[in-house]
Amino acid sequence: MDSVLALVDKVVLYYKENGKNYERMGNMIERLGIEKVKQDILG
């Protein structure tokens, strides 16, 4: 369970740093590309 919460924290922080104002997360992922987002979050 702790690993899930840690991953959620990473995703939320990534969204705060890379999302535009009022942009949905899915739109941010489409804009940046899923492979880049996965690489940036998961390392």
Image (cartoon, helix red, strand yellow):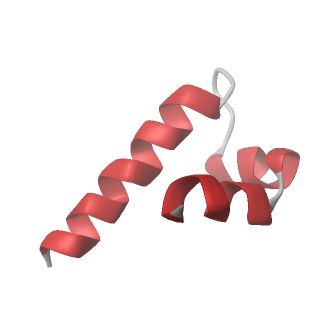
- Direction front: furthest residue: 43
Residue shown at 76%/63% (left/top)?
34
Q: Is residue 21 left or right of residue 27?
A: left
Q: Is residue 29 left or right of residue 43?
A: right
Residue shown at 63%/32% (left/top)?
18
Q: Is residue 19 left or right of residue 16?
A: right
Relative height, residue 22 to residue 40 (above, below) = above
Q: Is residue 11 left or right of residue 38?
A: left
Residue shown at 53%/56% (left/top)?
41
Q: Position of residue 25 (x, y in %)?
A: 63, 48
Nearer to us in this view, 9 or 20: 9
- Examine the image and state in which quarter residue 36 appears: bottom right
Q: Position of residue 5 (x, y in %)?
A: 22, 64
Q: Position of residue 30 (x, y in %)?
A: 83, 54
Where's the N terminus, which quadrant?
A: bottom left
Nearer to us in this view, 23 or 2: 2
Relative height, residue 24 to residue 18 (above, below) = below
